Structures are given as C-alpha cells and as structure tokens.
Amino acid sequence: MNQTLAIAIWKNRISPLFDASRSVLLLRIEDGKELKREQVKLEGEAPTSRADTLAARGVDVLICGAISRPFARAIESRDIRIIPFIAGDPEAIITSFLINRLEASHRMPGCAPHRRRRHRGRGGAQ
C-alpha cells in the first residue's frame, strides 16, 4: 500500500498542538517501507491554508498531538485521516506506525481515544 504520512513536528518531537506547528515531516511509504522523507513548512495560519498545503503534497494520514476542531474539519474535508493525541519521539512513532501499533501506544497523557457521541437535546431527545 502506498501512502504519504505527515507528522507535525516541534523541536524534534511531535508537536503538542497541530495549530501551532510550523512544519511537518513528510514520509512516502510503499509496502510498509519508508521511501523518502522531507521537512515541509506549513504555509499560512488559517486551517484551510494548512489543509491545502497537506492536500497539495498528497498527504493521506496526519499524526499530531492535539488539534482544534476547525483545523481537524479542514483537514478531514480533504480526505486526510488524522491520528491525534500522539506524543513522543518521531522516529519511535514512525516505527510504530509502520508496524500498525501506533494507536495503542504513544498516546498523550490523559488523552484516551474518543468516540463520537450523540448529543441529547432538552428533555432527553436525541
């Protein structure tokens, strides 16, 4: 399977907040192996600008720490899968991603995977 992975970087770690990230590490992956890697500057401050930069680079998956809803919506609207609330050393995270063990490890402290919930209206109506 071929894909492009983007990892939000800040001071040689996973950026704790994607919204404040200035660059991503891009990896081209083919058949579970890294083919190419490059550092890419994120253009603009707006969610749409950043999402456009990722989409233009062919990103399929974004790994990051926390991410605000406006940024997440903009990125997901471009069919980019987000794996949020990840922390640690990028090399360890890349290794875990390549062997399909990322989501079980490297989670930010206190950040359990969340499920989409239906919000109840007044009177308990759904």
Image (cartoon, rainbow, N blue to C red):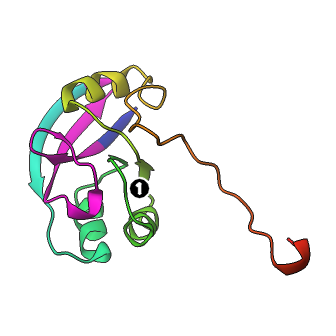
Q: Position of residue 59 (x, y in %)?
A: 30, 52
Where does the N terminus fall, quadrant-wise? Answer: top left
Where does the C terminus fall, quadrant-wise? Answer: bottom right
Work out whether 55 lies above or below 62. Answer: below
Image side of residue 24 versus residue 85, left or right: left
Total number of numbered discs in the rendering? 1
Identity of the amino acid at label 1? Ile
Per the rendered image, the range of residues in magenta is 5-33
94 or 122: which is nearer to us?
Answer: 122
Q: Residue at x 36, y 39 (%)?
A: 86
Image side of residue 17 versus residue 119, left or right: left
Q: Position of residue 92 (x, y in %)?
A: 25, 23
Which residue position holds label 1? 80
52 or 20: which is nearer to us?
Answer: 20
Work out whether 2 lies above or below 45. Answer: above
Q: Position of residue 68 (x, y in %)?
A: 39, 65
Q: Find out whether residue 44 is within the magenta segment.
A: no
Q: Find out whether residue 6 is within the magenta segment.
A: yes
